[in-house]
């Protein structure tokens, strides 16, 4: 009796988890990725742990992942899913110092963490930007020659700055500094997502009209370009300020802010970018609680990557489960990683800035 009842409850929750995706599918936009099914049987796939790390800046051991783990990047390498995740300790000011850990999975659902972070504030040239808030919210693509290129946010407790690092093995990283360069060193910037294409189970950074493109920002979304994936220049408007690609919309789910999600995909229809958004605390839509983070999708012109061709009218992903609604920051799903793996898209996301979960969609979608 109980088992049957439990099965009915789980099935009902599964239907609810797909509800927002079905809303998006009903828009009949053939370019949209998904719909995505949250994997309730295994979620959350990553939670805080008791790992200990000798912090070179503090000069002492810290429980580096004790408070929260969230907002991951992911890649597929040698038939396994590698996840770079943000972890917070309990001692740093600004809600804990963030470092990046590495976890590996054979099936994309069950992960084994490395005992220590692979990327963290150190006594190096980036300490001025990274301490004591830490390093946050990675996104990773692979270069054509097999180099992993990671964007991340450096936070000194006052200003968030978009930065970049590279690695050949996902363990040893070289920091390359500020994405926007010295001219914009004191400009708030974060969430850089580099345009890529799918090549089997790899997501390869790919030039668009002769240049690599990155979308960034966490109020409006802007763009920058590069010839080598290391040195970037912001796209400016006629007035010499950052060119806004798109922004929030009054009266819709994305009414307060928009922020890039996983690396955008170059497709035959254009560039598809999954983006995160927030419902305004006092002027948002009534169907969502104030401050709720949901996700939408936008189609950008591959001939002019700053031109919006189409955009979803409704969110396709929203907080529904207890661990998405309750946590460090309630009512948050924050999408940052999307990988092709064994005939599926696996979408990894942070839940309430506290844990990490996964959703899937058939690769044919």
Image (cartoon, helix red, strand yellow):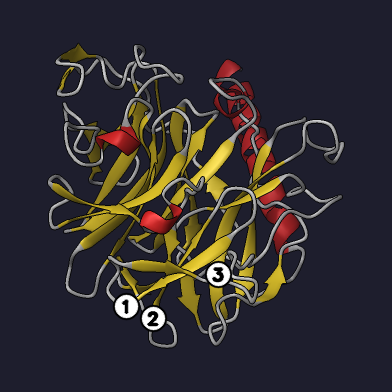
- 303 vs 141, left or right, is right
Q: Residue at x 23, y 75 (%)?
A: 144
SS type, badge 2 = loop
Which residue is disc 3 drawn over? 272
Report whether residue 145 is seen: yes
Residue 277 x/y as whole percent: 65, 47
SS type, badge 1 = loop
Q: CA distance from mark 1 to mark 3?
A: 21 Å
Q: Quadrant of residue 133?
A: top left
Q: Which mark is residue 283?
A: none
Q: CA distance from mark 3 to mark 2?
A: 17 Å
Q: Say which of 80 and 255 sits in front.
A: 255
Q: Which comes sooner in the sequence, label 1 or label 3?
A: 1
Which residue is disc 2 drawn over? 211
Instruction: Determine contact: label 2, label 1, CB under 8 Å.
Output: yes
Q: Is residue 128 above or below residue 297?
A: above
Q: Which comes sooner in the sequence, label 3 or label 2?
A: 2
Of badges 3 and 2, the one in the foreground is 2
Instruction: Determine contact: label 3, label 2, CB under 8 Å.
Output: no
Q: Work out which quarter of the rendered image holds the N terminus and state it.
A: top right
Q: Residue at x 63, y 61 (%)?
A: 297
Q: Is residue 302 above or below residue 320?
A: below
Instruction: Determine contact: label 1, label 3, CB under 8 Å.
Output: no
10 Å crowding of disc 2: few (<14), some (14-19), many (20+): some
Q: Is residue 23 above or below residue 146?
A: above
SS type, badge 3 = strand
Q: Quadrant of residue 112?
A: top left
Q: CA distance from mark 2 to mark 1?
A: 5 Å
Residue 237 x/y as whole percent: 62, 73
Q: Residue at x 62, y 24 (%)?
A: 330
Which residue is disc 1 drawn over? 227
- 118 vs 283, left or right, is left
């Amino acid at each position: 009796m109980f088992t049957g009842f439990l099965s009915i409850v789980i099935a009902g929750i599964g239907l609810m988890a797909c509800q927002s995706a079905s809303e998006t599918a009903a828009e009949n936009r053939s370019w949209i990725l998904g719909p995505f099914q949250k994997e309730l049987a295994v979620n959350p796939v990553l939670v805080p742990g008791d790992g200990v790390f000798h912090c070179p800046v503090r000069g002492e051991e810290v429980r580096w992942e004790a408070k929260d783990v969230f907002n991951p990047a992911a890649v597929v390498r040698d038939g396994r899913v590698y996840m770079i995740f943000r972890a917070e300790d309990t001692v740093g000011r600004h809600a804990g110092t963030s470092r990046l850990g590495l976890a590996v999975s054979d099936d994309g659902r069950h992960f084994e963490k490395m005992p220590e972070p692979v990327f963290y504030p150190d006594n190096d040239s980036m300490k001025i930007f990274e301490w004591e808030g830490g390093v946050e919210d990675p996104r990773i693509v692979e270069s054509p020659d097999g180099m992993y290129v990671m964007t991340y946010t450096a936070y000194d407790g006052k200003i968030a700055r978009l930065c970049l690092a590279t690695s050949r093995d996902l363990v040893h990283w070289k920091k390359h500094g500020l994405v926007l360069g010295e001219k914009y060193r004191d400009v708030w910037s974060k969430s850089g997502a580099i345009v890529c294409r799918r090549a089997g189970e790899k997501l390869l950074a790919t030039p668009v009209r002769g240049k690599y493109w990155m979308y960034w920002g966490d109020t409006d979304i802007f763009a920058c370009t590069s010839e080598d994936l290391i040195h970037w220049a912001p796209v400016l408007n006629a007035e010499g300020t950052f060119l806004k690609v798109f922004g929030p919309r009054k009266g819709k789910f994305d009414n307060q802010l928009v922020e890039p999600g996983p690396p955008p995909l170059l497709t035959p229809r254009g560039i598809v970018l999954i983006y995160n958004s927030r419902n305004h605390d006092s002027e948002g839509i009534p169907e969502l609680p104030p401050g709720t983070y949901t996700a939408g999708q936008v189609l950008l012109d591959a001939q002019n990557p700053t031109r919006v061709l189409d955009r979803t009218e409704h969110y396709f992903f929203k907080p529904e489960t207890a661990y998405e609604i309750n946590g460090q920051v309630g009512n948050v799903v924050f999408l940052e990683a999307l990988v092709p793996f064994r005939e599926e898209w696996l979408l990894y996301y942070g839940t309430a800035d506290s844990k990490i979960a996964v959703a899937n969609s058939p690769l044919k979608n």
